[in-house]
Image (cartoon, helix red, strand yellow):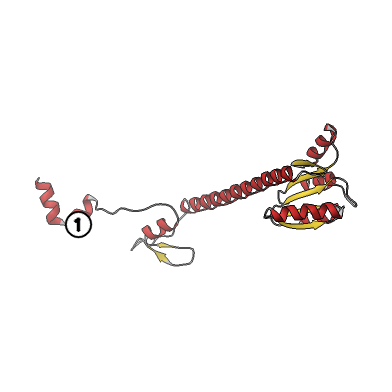
Amino acid sequence: MNVLIAEDTATTRLALTAHLKKWGFSVTGVEDGLKAFDILKSAEEAQLVLLDWEMPEMNGPEVCLRLRTLPDVASHYIILLTGRTDVEDVVTGLQAGANDYVHKPFVPAELRARVEVGSRMLQLEATLANRVDELEKSLAEIKQLSGLLPMCAGCKKIRTDTGYWSEVEEYMMGHSDLTFSHGLCPECIVKYYPDYADKINKK
């Protein structure tokens, strides 16, 4: 998973990068909030983000606020880095859209724990999104099965979307979780196996 670090102090940015790479993350580093915002607003996949509070061009809470108000932007997990400890500042950052806080100077063990929480949250969201996609596809197939099916009046085959004529069993198993067990109804027993039908009737 990639982590975007937005930190204007080079030494802090390098220290964060070194720790994250040691923990198995890939890292992109920028030195101001505007560059971070430009990357995040166009990212196709959600990212884990470490945002410094005080930065040139655009501060951390402003980046959060602008991202959260944009439609169709990936749901990034944002951790604010700040030396501020007042409750009012914490509330301001969270209300702007941050998911968590790490106080500076950061403690590596705490940073790792919070980053791993964010990573798990993003993975969970990705899993849920995949499940939703699967459910939507299943619903689409159910709707397709509940619609009008073109069937041959003679052989009873079904015409597929590609124009191919398929056996009913083959079509149904390809568009649902159905499996078929085969038997004979009383009428077909009489039609195809009259001797066997006579023996049953005599009993």
Instruction: Give whichever of 153, 161 is nearer the camera.
Output: 161
Q: Residues within 10 Å of mark 1 (few under 14, many from 20)?
A: few
> Taking the image as drawn, is residue 26 in sight?
yes
**Is residue 37 shown to the viewer in this render?**
no
In terms of depth relative to the viewer, which is nearer, 57 or 166? 57
- Could you say which quadrant of the image residue 89 lies in? top right
At x 54%, y 51%, the residue is: 134
Q: Is residue 177 left or right of residue 35?
A: left
Could you tell me which quadrant the N terminus lies in?
Answer: bottom right
Identify the image quadrant of the C terminus. top left
In the picture of the structure, the residue carrying the numbered disc 1 is: 191
Query: Which residue is pictured at 24% across the width and 51% down the height?
Result: 185
Q: Where is residue 160 shown, x and y percent of the image?
A: 45, 63
Front residue of 159 and 105: 105
Left or right: residue 176 versus residue 133 is: left
Residue plotted at (90% across, 52% down): 57
- The image shows residue 151 at horizontal and vertical percentages of 40, 60
Disc 1 residue type? Answer: Lys
